[in-house]
Amino acid sequence: MLKKKKTEVYALGEHISMSADKARRVIDQIRGRSYEETLMILELMPYRACYPILKLVYSAAANASYNMGSNETNLVISKAEVNEGTTVKKLKPRARGRSFPIKRSTCHITIVMKDISLDDEYGEMSSLKKTRWKKKSTAMTYSDMYNSGGLWDKK
């Protein structure tokens, strides 16, 4: 039986004290990008979620270089996901002996990196990148406006 060489490594951060929605906002920007491009994006984004995600990307790259001996230039983020963690619940004392609940949410972040030099199916990695919307020209030309029935289908 042939043993297939492992091409993916991951880094997992659990119980990060941050809302999962705020972490997803950053994760959606880096999914499918290369390692160097991800570092530039995370260092320049103004969100608080960037620092723990940056640490996880560094950790996944270190795992790739140690476990597989791969170069950092060949790494691509193949999968990045954020799941909700436990919620820490506290009570804040309020006036007249009442209390107000404080809910501190946490999240679990998983970064999976793939070495494209070891992988044969690099063509599928291009589908992971976000498609950029191209601006379509919606202006009608002068001849189209009058020949095709115009804007209001009146002659």
Image: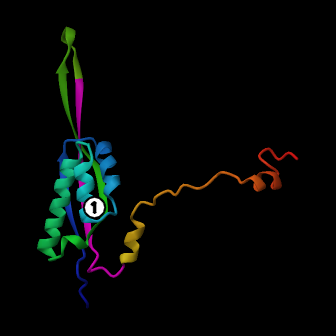
The answer to whether residue 145 of the structure is visible from this angle is yes
Majority secondary structure in the magenta region? strand
At a point 20% along the width and 59% down the height, the residue shown is: 57
Q: On screen, 49 above or below 39?
A: above
Q: What residue type is labelled 1?
A: Glu
Q: What element carries label 1?
A: helix
Q: In this view, does 133 lie to the left or right of 11?
A: right
Single out the residue that lies furthest toward the front.
142
Single out the residue that lies furthest toward the left.
66
At a point 25% along the width and 84% down the height, the residue shown is: 4
Q: Is residue 126 left or right of residue 153?
A: left
Query: Badge 1: few (under 14), some or many (20 or more) residues near its Cα, within 10 Å?
Result: few
Quadrant showing the N terminus: bottom left
Q: Position of residue 48 (x, y in %)?
A: 22, 42
At a point 23% along the width and 78% down the height, the residue shown is: 6
Front residue of 73/20: it is 73
Instruction: State the residue position of label 1.
Output: 37
At a point 85% along the width and 45% down the height, the residue shown is: 154
Q: Quadrant of residue 135?
A: bottom right
Part of the protein shown in magenta: 101-121
Task: Let me know if residue 103 is in the magenta part.
Answer: yes
Q: Quadrant of residue 81?
A: bottom left
Q: Position of residue 41 (x, y in %)?
A: 27, 54
Q: On screen, 2 above or below 9?
A: below
